[in-house]
Amino acid sequence: MPLIQQLPSHLADMIAAGEVVERPASVVKELLENTIDAGASAVSVELRGGGMSLIRVSDNGCGIAPEELPTAFLRHATSKLRTEKDLSCIGTLGFRGEALAAIAAVSRIEITSRRRGAARGARMSLEGGTAGAVEECGCPEGTTISVHNLFFNTPARMKFMKKDSAEASAAAAVVQHEALSHARISFKLTRDGTEQLYTPGDGKLLSAIYSALGREFALSLLAVEGSGSAVAVDGFATRSLQGRGTRAMQHFFVNGRYVKSPLLSAALEEAYRNQIMKGKFPGCVLHLSLPLDAVDVNVHPAKTVVKFLNERAVFDAVYYAVKSALEQGGERPAAPAPSPRPAQPTPADSPAPPKQNASFYQTMTAQEFRARTAPGKPLTSFSLQQGANTPVSEWGGSITVADSVQPTSKSVPPSPATAARIPPLAPQAHPAAENAADCPPASISAAPPASFTPAVDADTPHTDPLAGQEQLEPSAEPPWRIAGEVLRTYIIAEDNQGTVWLIDKHAAHERVNFDRMKRNAEPIMGQQLLTPEAVALSADACAVLLEHLDLLNQFGFEAEDFGDGTILCRTCPAEIDAGDIAPALEEIADQLLRTGRADPDGARDVMLHTMACKAAIKAGMVSGEQELRVLVDKVQKGEIQFCPHGRPVKVKLSRYELEKMFKRA
């Protein structure tokens, strides 16, 4: 057996750093929590190279005494805990005493700090966890920590970092969360010399929401306030008609700490039951206040997951507070006026801060910025004689086509050689027309007999039918028939065994699209937008899409970072409408965050799922008999069993089950 020996302290610090410091956003989070605990009223964050080159956090808090600077970077050194009893009532954000030591172990750090009322401050440098001498210096009251060259001594971690834009967006999400949790503090975020975020710090939550999440979201909110069983809830939630495509805009804070909680999301969404469109999710910024000993915050390394002593009371408090706000309605909150800027902490060696970016208070929003291109015209329904080799489209009557594609107004006469080989088409009757009494009311009558002249010379070589179309081959009568369609959603089919099938046409068509795209090796065709589409997203959603820009481009999305959590889309897949771009990107981002971040194949399937869904026939659309028949044939032949999301596409009702319902069996 190998000898057991104690690890060197430096190696132990690097291992601990791997648990605490995952990426630049982790560093920003730990440093910001320290500034908040230090009682700062103004905080400045500067990023360069996505945070890999430089992270500088300055505050005007209480500062650190010169003699305490070396101690601050030792493991398990903290000013926030004294006894084991303090663990049962943690009221600070940082408390474990590992953050500074972990960050110092994998970077080069320079810290300057001056206590309030002190004549001079102190400076100290560290490299790879090794501290230098403490020097006296002049600096503003508060603390400034500069983290240079993150992971310079851990190349194994360095290779897992994303693009600078993605890392910067993840760090911006952290600043955004802290700004929403502490409206009394003014936060400023500068990225590569450009100001990205500024909150006034006037103590008004709506001001912080307006600055961090945008004007459009702020104006969609209702005030929420309630309490019960020692749990108080206040904040804002979106109106019922302002549902989002994902849960990305749900922000919960417990005693000033940003948390991710399925319990709180469930309580919020339960309050919107029967009041929000299916498939949409409410957004919110809700603060919960409860006794410190009623919540455990030390259950997750990142401290974003908490446990409640009384989950029922917490659920009820959120549910009834939001429910009451929705029932009362209320006026839309007025957009906050810009507040005067407090003095921002500026380190002595920093360049002059850039001029104020007034974009947060301009009246033009992202929605007003983009002039949406008019959606394509609906495809006109044509009734062609069902002869041999007549192409039948899978797509519904609402599929859009380019404005330049127009149906021909007259037929092109065939060449003499071609005409000699084309037999005349005999009139064909509808299969069910021989016995009108057997034809159900929901069935569709056949088109009247008509001749058909091909638009392309038969001698001209041609390829397979266009993508998205099916070629019906003449075959024997299938052992099933379409009896009709109900609710413009479910197809009713009957087989020769006396079994009735209900088929979800959207789910079936979605699977058809997915399978076709999956096996198609050709690139997805994109359509250039006349006006680029600016899609405002949450910081997390924006970050994950920026990580997968190459993947988006492979599937027809040409997008780029537009700043302030906005993606600018210049090209979208030809198979989806321009109006579906924002929901599609939101859904892609949500699924990538949950399933596909580190799995290229999984990320590709996420893209295909979303594109197949957006291009499929929607429930409520009017569908022709021929396109319904294509779907039914595929389902009944067993080619389609489930939609890409795993939902069944058909439900079986046997003759016995039907007769039992009517008391015949």
Image: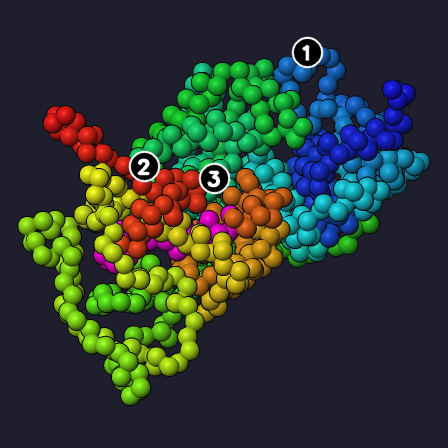
Query: Image quarter for residue 15?
Result: top right
| Disc 1: which residue | 85
Query: Image quarter for residue 208?
Result: top right
> Residue 628: horizontal and vertical position, in percent?
27, 54
Q: Secondary structure at mark 3?
A: loop
- Residue at x-position 26% and y-position 81%: 411
For the question of whether residue 337 can be seen, the reply is no
Q: Secondary structure at mark 2?
A: loop
> Residue 503: horizontal and vertical position, in percent?
29, 44
Left or right, 224 with respect to 651, comes to right
Q: Nearer the viewer, residue 421 or 266?
A: 421
- Residue at x-position 68% and y-position 52%: 163
Asked if 318 appears above or below 389 in the picture, the reply is above
Q: Earlier in the sequence, mark 1 or mark 2?
A: 1
**Which region is colored magenta?**
606-628
Q: Amino acid at mark 1?
A: Lys
Kindly report the secondary structure that dominates the magenta region of the rendered protein: helix
Q: Residue furthest left?
A: 437
